[in-house]
Image (cartoon, helix red, strand yellow):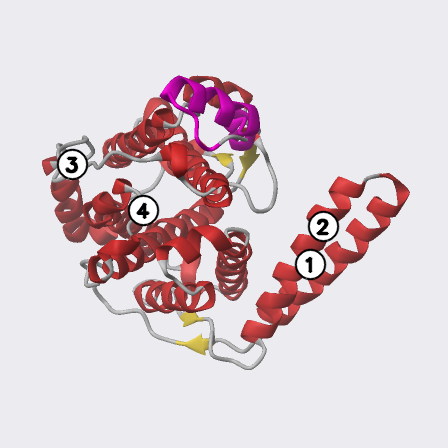
Amino acid sequence: MNVHATTHEELAAEIGDRFDTDAMAQESTLLNPRFYTTDFDELDRIDVTPVRDEWDTLIAQMKSDPNKGHFKKNADWDKVDWDNMEPKLKREFIDFLVSSCTAEFSGCVLYKEMKRRGNNPDICELFNYMARDEARHAGFINDALREAGVAVNLGFLTKAKKYTYFRPKFIYYATYLSEKIGYARYITIYRHLEANPDKRFHPIFKWFREWCNDEFSHGEAFALLMRTDPKLTESFANKLWIRFFLTAVYSTMYVRDHARPAFHEALGVDIDWYDQEVFRKTSEIAKQVFPMELDIDHPRWMPNLKRMEHAFRKIEAAEKTGGVAGKMAKFTAGASAAWAFVALYTIPVKKSTPPASVRLEPAY
């Protein structure tokens, strides 16, 4: 690909040949963001009475819409030199933006569906505000992709993307962690670039501070939802599920981040350091509602993350190879990834006691 295209239209055409972002967004793999559906009737039966005071405070904050005018380009939005961006960095950055856009939009789709189907005023109001925020996030990222001529067709994605059914409690665990880890990721990048502005190769990073506070408040909502039913975090079976989702979300992030070495190098970030920092922040925050945290300093932690990352690279290579040899290699690599996950899952956890008051405020 000629990275010295002379016009935006030529650049868009050339990038478009290489990056089918609609296809990228539609992919349904273990590492790609998914669209979810759930038992909306069960969600509609939620009674927030046990957390009413904290709930009303959070809803009032969301209703005030502190980020109403934030997701708009202004004088701080520097011109991006897509023409001369290093090709590997361009590929990985576009992949990052598409993945982020898809994740934000998946939240919007789920929350809008709950608002549309539900009759519970507390739950419908919450999901209305969260759908509003996620729509803004997805639209803002898509504007950045549009500058490169590779915007995702979000309307088409709603119909074309496969949906995964999760029981409501699994939605709570997965989405809570997604929102909180999103906060930790964004604020860690923001603080790093605040100290190293020469590494800010795209203006979208300037918007991360207020953006991550939306992620934080969404996580607070799911923490409150879990507090409405003590069994969700206190029963033996659900503790095993919480442990599963913690392990799955952390290990997925590690594998996905290591697929973007040029992106993190451009930011001036060591991936292992960055991921451990994000895990540490997320673990500290998640003690607000989860009765445990993963031991990310355990001797088995990092070696098995690396084994899982290596196994997923082998799976990708096997898929490209195809045929009988490719299938055998994929099976072997899949077994290796599964074994690494079991090794991570069985690391003894650190037990903790969630505080009486569940609400937190962003502190990083």
Q: Which residues are magenta?
A: 3-25
What's the residue at 54%, 42% (across, down)? 32
Q: Quadrant of residue 135?
A: top left
Q: Mark 4 or mark 3, which has the lower sequence index?
A: 3
Q: CA distance from mark 4 to mark 3?
A: 20 Å
Q: Quadrant of residue 350?
A: bottom left
Within 10 angstroms of label 2, few (less than 14), some, or many (20 or more) residues?
A: many
Q: CA distance from mark 1 to mark 2?
A: 6 Å
Q: Mark 3 or mark 1, which has the lower sequence index?
A: 3
Name the quadrant of the C terminus.
bottom left
| Residue 333 coordinates in the image, percent (x, y) | 75, 56
Whether residue 152 is visible to the viewer of this picture, yes or no, is no
Q: Mark 1 or mark 4, which has the lower sequence index?
A: 4
Q: Are marks 3 and 1 in contact (CB under 8 Å)?
A: no
Residue extending furthest toward the right? 324
Q: Which residue is mark 1?
A: 311
Q: CA distance from mark 3 to mark 1?
A: 41 Å
User: In front of the other: label 1 or label 4?
Assistant: 4
Does the magenta portion include 11?
Answer: yes
Mark linked to residue 70? 3
Amino acid under disc 3: His
Q: Which residue is mark 2?
A: 315
Is residue 30 depicted above or below 265 in this figure? above
Q: Are marks 3 and 2 in contact (CB under 8 Å)?
A: no
Amino acid under disc 2: Ile
What's the residue at 51%, 19% (across, down)? 159
Q: Which residue is mark 4?
A: 201
Mark linked to residue 291? none
Amino acid under disc 4: Phe
What's the residue at 75%, 41% (across, down)? 320
